[in-house]
Amino acid sequence: MAKRKNYPEEFKRDAVDLVRSSPVRSLTDIAHGLGIHLETLRKWVRENLARAQAAGVTPAFRTGDDTVIRLRFVDEHRNAHRVKRMCDVLRWDRSGYYTWHQNKEARREKADEEEGLARRIREIHTDYRGPTGPADHPETLGPAARGEPQTCRTDHAGA
């Protein structure tokens, strides 16, 4: 069994700071570079986050945060801060934010459409008391699958 190592608190803090300031480098790469086990580094990062949350302090963004979360952050704070400055700090191209912002209405329409579809699926699921296949729901199928006559789109008279 390997001997357990005791690392100084300063080393742990510096390792966690390195993780937070290096979004491109993987935890594995950082742990290897520091000469520590990957799971040890993960534990330190989790402990640091738990301490920060207990103190009521949380970082605005962490490695792996979704782009949409960041775009929403900029959108929510654009009245308090200039978009250009926020994008510079976050190291983004402003055009990405403005494209996302201009497509807000289209995203809202798509979300409404998807919610309507999800509602319809739930209704069918409830009506038929469980998941079933398309053959059990002819109203969801096209005309050919329902046995209705199809119109031919090609002219076979010359054949």
Image (tube, helix red, strand yellow):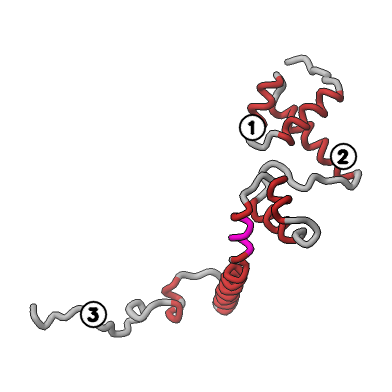
Residue 100 in sight: yes
Q: Nearer the viewer, residue 84 or 71?
A: 84
Where on the picture, by quarter, is residue 124? bottom right
- The residue sitting at 26% across, 83% down in the picture is 151
Residue 104 on image: x %, y % = 62, 67
Q: What element carries label 2?
A: helix
Earlier-in-chain disc, 1 versus 3: 1
State the CA–CA distance, disc 1 to disc 3: 57 Å
Tell me residue 73's x, y (percent). 73, 56
Secondary structure, magenta segment, majority class: helix
Instruction: Classify 118 as above or below 61.
Output: below
- Secondary structure state at the residue bearing disc 3: loop
Question: Residue sitting at 73 percent across and 43 percent down?
Answer: 62
Asked if 118 appears above or below 96 in the picture, the reply is below
Quadrant in which the C terminus appears: bottom left
* Span colored in magenta: 96-101
Compare marks 1 and 2 and give the one earlier in the sequence: 1
Residue at the spot 63% in from the left edge and 35% down from the top edge: 24
Residue 84: which disc?
none
Task: Tell me the amino acid under the disc marked 2.
Answer: Arg
14 sits left or right of 88 in the view? right
Q: Is residue 31 above or below residue 46?
A: above
Say which residue label 2 marks.
51
